[in-house]
Image (cartoon, rainbow, N blue to C red):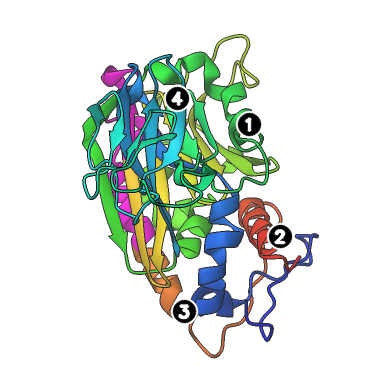
Amino acid sequence: MAESVRYQVEADIASAATLDARFYNDETAFHALGERVFARTWQWIGEAADVREPGSLSPRELRAGALVEPLLLSRDAGGKLRCLSNVCTHRGNILVGAPCRAKEIRCGYHSRRFDLAGRMTFMPEFQDAKNFPSASDNLPQVPFAEWLGHAFASIDPVAPLEAFVGDVAKYVGWMGVERFAFDAVHSRDYELDASWALYVENYLEGFHIPFVHHGLNEVVDYGSYSSTLFRYANLQRALAKGSEPAFDLPPGSPEHGQRVAAYYFFVFPNLMLNFYPWGLSLNLVQPRGLEATTIAFRSYVWDASKLGAGAGSELDRVEYEDEAVVRAVSRGVRSRFYRHGRYSPTRERGVHHFHRLLCEFLGNN
């Protein structure tokens, strides 16, 4: 990161100024995020359903900002699931292009072969090579973990996956999330010409709901909207207005007896897990450039009879409203007259927490 710009956010939200506006247009900081933030946290790489059987191979890609890594989920004959590099150790060819079943991993370029644990087993025309094979000819294993049926990978995780998502299950584990059904009809990608960080900030506060989301404001009780901070995550909860749909929370739930309309979990740095009475809307925010962001919406249905009602309805409309305001902020933070704002201590705790984590990972706080 350029030494001329150091990003710091004060711990006391009551006196802190927001993240320096230069951050959103800082090319050096954007590239630093790849190694310092995205490589050291856990990235969602999809469901693990297609690698349930021994001999299953499924290519994935870990992509966030300047970080791009081709990965391969591989379950060997003994049933052990691994996450491997999907790059041949000979000349860098991509090994597997589509989900399949196989007894070995074979490179289509020069026929180098690996077993399903990633160990190189065969290479033609290398009989005269010295000190061959060595450990570097095997496929590197990538830190990997499963959580409620979903797969996560990290290059160099600062902490186990449990430290990032462990608190989520305390609130929604009773729902049987691993049994939710993927809904392709309501799953799509959105392209946004604005900073990924501005999009995340907007998500992390319900402050704007009465002013931006008039439809959503009709079904949730803004006055009782609250947030809880964890080490690498946070939770926003919205209670239902009147007779609007709400969870039927079991006795073991931390909020049994309350009419919760939605649980909005944010997992640092770029994952949103939105639970509604109908199921889960998972949103992955993928930076592509300083002003280029892809937001992947993936829907998983628990109770189809509750689709289209309450806080979890009209997600497209809410998304477009959010994108409009984020685009406006993206233009505004480039102004020579704007440098910092202030946080609402009651409504913007999540934004402050996000900014503090960014600075921590970038090595400034």
Label 4 to label 3: alpha-carbon separation? 47 Å
Disc 4 residue type (three-letter): Leu
Write down the region rendered in magenta: 298-323
- Is residue 330 highlighted in magenta? no
State the residue position of label 1: 162
State the residue position of label 2: 360
Circle 4 SS class: strand
Q: Which quadrant holds the C terminus?
A: bottom right
> Which of disc 1 and disc 3 is earlier in sequence?
1
| Residue 354 falls in image quadrant | bottom right
10 Å crowding of disc 3: few (<14), some (14-19), many (20+)? few
Q: Is residue 260 left or right of residue 8?
A: left
Q: Is residue 328 left or right of residue 148?
A: left
Residue lying farthest to the front in this orientation: 128
User: Is there a contact, CB below 8 Å, between mark 4 and mark 3?
Assistant: no
Taking the spot 44% from the left edge, 67% from the top edge, the residue there is 195
State the residue position of label 4: 81
> Which of disc 3 and disc 4 is earlier in sequence?
4
- Is residue 318 highlighted in magenta? yes
> Which of disc 2 and disc 4 is earlier in sequence?
4
Foreground: disc 2 or disc 3: 2
State the residue position of label 3: 332
Disc 2 residue type (three-letter): Glu
Disc 1 residue type (three-letter): Glu
